[in-house]
């Protein structure tokens, strides 16, 4: 017997709460430290850190205890950590801390994940609307005629950055016909959306993922799976805000709502 849509949604919802609360999940992020070309200290970490064309660099002594994942001994001298945009991305550890370099628009930063982060310790789950089948509707994806595009949007850290977009989905939900700008992420589609509940009943914006469109563009837009962006779980993420036109003027009473705390 196959699971019902409501059962599949419950499984997805439970997995979401479990994933963000793992020891080095989104709730554990305690810092995003942008690196300069010259060696500098990173608050709370030993050694000196900087960025070059290959990635993040660290200079440390073995006694500092920084170990690149996969290495048999701590860094004693200099080491390279390739960022998340590299297929062979690196991470490092310092005791229980996980250190992960990221690259955004050519700039590198070091993220620090701490299992003892206060946000992780106080996490009590993710509130969500009950599953409702009317929020899962057919949609049609149409790629942009001129190819992929970029739109500059504000980010959660206060900076404007380009967001890659590839086309639009058209759909009818709650009696309203609308279009939204989306991006390809592998074979699937992703979008950043807001609606009349944003900033009140729900977080200020949410993310959505759609199945890979068929050859004729047909896919499914399931707002029951609208989910909180990483910056809802830690202030140190730099999530993009919705692009122009992705703010729905009606209430989407579906999907994740807020982070719950003890």
Image (tube, rainbow, N blue to C red):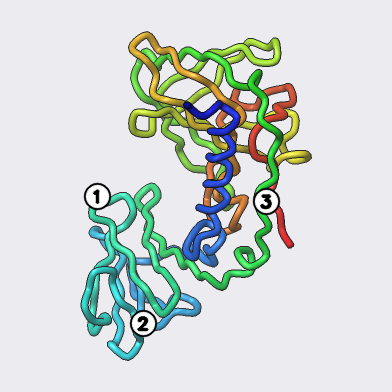
Frontmost of labels 1 and 2 is 1
- Kindly identify which numbered label has been placed on residue 87: 1
Disc 1 to disc 2, C-alpha distance: 26 Å
Question: Which residue, given by chain and number where applicable, does mark 3 sit on?
Answer: 259
**Residue at 74% across / 40% down in the picture?**
199
SS of the residue under disc 3: strand
In the image, residue 191 lies at what x, y percent? 51, 31
SS of the residue under disc 2: loop
Q: Depth check: 111 or 155 in front? A: 111
Disc 1 to disc 3, C-alpha distance: 32 Å
SS of the residue under disc 1: loop
- Residue 235 found in image quarter: bottom right
In the image, residue 172 sits, relative to residue 130, either above or below, namely above
Give the number of callouts.
3
**Residue at 63% across / 69% down in the picture?**
118
In the image, residue 52 sits, relative to residue 173, either above or below, namely below
Horizontal relation, residue 92 to residue 256: left or right: left
Circle 1 crowding by C-alpha within 10 Å: few under 14, some 14–19, many from 20: few
Disc 2 to disc 3, C-alpha distance: 35 Å
Precedes in sequence: disc 2 or disc 3? 2
- Residue 145 found in image quarter: top left
């Amino acid at each position: 017997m196959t699971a019902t849509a409501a059962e599949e949604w419950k499984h997805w919802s439970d997995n979401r709460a479990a994933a963000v609360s793992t020891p080095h999940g989104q709730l554990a992020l305690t810092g995003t430290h942008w690196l300069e070309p010259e060696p500098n200290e990173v608050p709370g970490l030993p050694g000196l850190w900087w960025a070059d064309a290959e990635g993040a660099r660290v200079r440390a002594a073995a006694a500092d205890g920084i170990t690149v994942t996969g290495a048999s001994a701590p860094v004693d001298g200099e080491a390279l950590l390739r960022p998340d945009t590299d297929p062979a991305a690196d991470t490092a550890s310092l005791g229980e801390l996980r250190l992960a370099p990221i690259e955004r628009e050519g700039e590198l930063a070091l993220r620090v994940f701490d299992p003892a982060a206060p946000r992780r310790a106080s996490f009590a789950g993710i509130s969500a609307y009950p599953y409702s089948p009317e929020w899962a509707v057919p949609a049609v994806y149409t790629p942009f005629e001129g190819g992929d595009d970029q739109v500059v949007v504000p980010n959660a850290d206060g900076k404007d950055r380009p967001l890659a977009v590839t086309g639009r989905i058209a759909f009818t939900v709650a009696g309203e016909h609308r279009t939204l700008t989306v991006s390809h992420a592998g074979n699937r589609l992703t979008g950043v959306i807001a609606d009349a509940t944003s900033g009140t009943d729900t977080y200020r914006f949410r993310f959505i993922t759609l199945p890979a469109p068929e050859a004729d563009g047909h896919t499914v837009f399931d707002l029951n799976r609208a989910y909180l962006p990483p910056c809802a779980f830690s202030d140190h993420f730099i999530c993009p805000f919705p692009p122009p036109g992705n703010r729905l003027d009606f209430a989407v009473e579906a999907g994740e709502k807020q982070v719950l705390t003890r």
